[in-house]
């Protein structure tokens, strides 16, 4: 299959390009498109075969449900059984935007789309290209991140091409994803609601609107073998570069010293080590492939750059990666959730 790459300007969207993409969606094909979180890989959410194509293109395990994207509230009512008062409050506050809510699904959504679950994750994105595509195709759009399963999520159209060239019909090549982290996921079918995946919308922001929100243990800890977390995707190694990644947490001076020692050892043994650092400690590293995520005082920039940096290590063919941990407050909750999973839970506390 040839993958058509179409440049699209989100400030001045050309209708003919949206039309082409809509035709593909309506005929069961797959279109990757920009959203404010990461690039999504879209297919008709009500067509089991389109869902099947998404799983095949990504190499995604079929028990990992797809998030369904909508362009207006009327679409929500067609798809879900019940909208709780808290879900209404959250949708008023955060939609369109980087929040996915879990609802009980209507039968119109096939089991293929939800990985066999009787609930469905729904999001109304705010990116103008995403909204135009969903609205004008007239279909709910199932769209997981447009990467090969397990790899870092795509924040630029070129990341999508790296992973899915020849496997999907079209890539709408818009700007780089503004946020750079996948949506926050909150389960609204239970009381209190449960945070299943942190994102740009933090637990504190949710709690300001609806009161207490629980956090699923799978957000930061490995689930036991055989246990299915509430968000099935959380059990897979995820967001990961090719080389093995280890995180180091603790006093920054000790952490930099420790990582530098590891770098020396690797070089002695003929390996190429990579390390991601913050601007604050950048100057303390002289050897190895050093990539900076940004300053610790600006978590939004760190979130925005993070996946591009992890992918850069793949391109530079490093053999092993070390990373400094970040604070786990505000947006740091989402940053650390992704990094801990990218590291396969290898996080070392330096005392
Ligand atoms: P992605 O589409 O790649 O951003 O991943 C979607 C995430 O949403 C995965 O971790 C899924 O397990 C989770 N998810 C999607 N639908 C549901 C659902 N109905 N219940 C719980 N988690 C869900
Ligand atoms: Mg994903």
Image (cartoon, grey):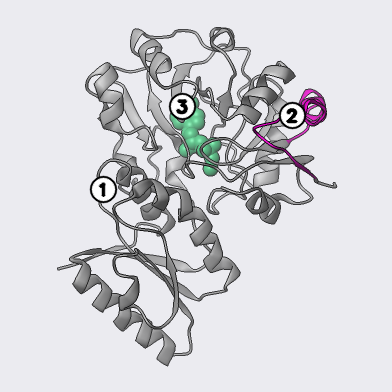
Q: Which residues are magenta?
A: 5-30
Q: Which residue is mark 2?
A: 49
**Is residue 259 shown above or below 268?**
above
Secondary structure under tag 1 reads loop
- Cα distance, mark 1 to mark 2? 40 Å
What percent of the width, then of the height, locates residue 91?
43, 16
Q: Residue at x 58, y 41 (%)?
A: 145
Residue 56 is inside the magenta segment: no
**Is residue 188 shown above or below 316?**
above
Secondary structure under tag 2 reads helix
Q: Which residue is mark 1?
A: 328
Mark 3 within 8 Å of ligand 1, using the beta carbon = yes
What percent of the width, then of the height, locates residue 3?
80, 46
In this rendering, does residue 270 appear at all? yes
- Cα distance, mark 1 to mark 3? 21 Å
Name the residue nearer the viewer: 12 or 29: 12
**Is residue 98 shown above or below 247?**
above
């Amino acid at each position: 299959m040839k993958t058509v790459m179409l440049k699209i300007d989100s400030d001045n969207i050309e209708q003919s390009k949206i039309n082409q993409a809509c035709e593909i969606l309506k005929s069961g094909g797959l279109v990757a498109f920009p959203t404010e979180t990461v690039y999504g890989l879209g297919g008709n959410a009500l067509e089991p075969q389109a869902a099947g194509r998404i799983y095949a293109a990504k190499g995604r395990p079929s028990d990992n449900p797809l998030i369904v994207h909508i362009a207006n509230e009327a679409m929500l009512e067609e798809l879900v059984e019940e909208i709780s008062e808290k879900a209404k409050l959250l949708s008023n506050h955060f939609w369109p935007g980087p929040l996915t809510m879990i609802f009980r699904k209507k039968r119109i959504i096939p089991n293929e789309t939800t990985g066999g679950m009787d609930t469905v994750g729904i999001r109304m994105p705010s990116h103008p290209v995403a909204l135009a595509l969903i609205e004008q195709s007239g279909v709910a759009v199932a769209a997981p991140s447009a990467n090969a399963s397990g790899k870092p999520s795509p924040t630029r159209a070129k990341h999508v091409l790296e992973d899915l060239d020849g496997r999907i019909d079209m890539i709408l090549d818009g700007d780089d994803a503004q946020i750079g982290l996948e949506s926050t996921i909150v389960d609204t079918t239970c009381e209190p609601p449960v945070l299943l995946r942190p994102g740009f919308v933090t637990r504190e922001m949710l709690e300001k609107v609806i009161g207490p929100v629980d956090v699923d243990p799978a957000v930061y800890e490995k689930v036991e073998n055989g246990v299915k977390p509430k968000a099935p995707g959380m059990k897979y190694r995820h967001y990961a570069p090719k080389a093995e990644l280890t995180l180091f947490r603790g006093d920054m001076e000790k952490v930099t010293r420790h990582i530098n020692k590891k770098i020396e050892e690797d070089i002695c043994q003929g390996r190429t080590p990579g390390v991601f650092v913050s601007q604050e400690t950048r100057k303390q590293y002289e050897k190895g492939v050093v990539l900076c995520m940004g300053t610790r005082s600006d978590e939004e920039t760190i979130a925005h750059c993070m996946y591009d940096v992890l992918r850069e290590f793949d391109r530079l063919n490093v053999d092993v990666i070390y990373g400094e941990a970040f604070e786990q407050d505000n947006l740091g909750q989402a940053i650390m959730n992704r990094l801990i999973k990218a590291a396969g839970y290898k996080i070392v506390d330096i005392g």
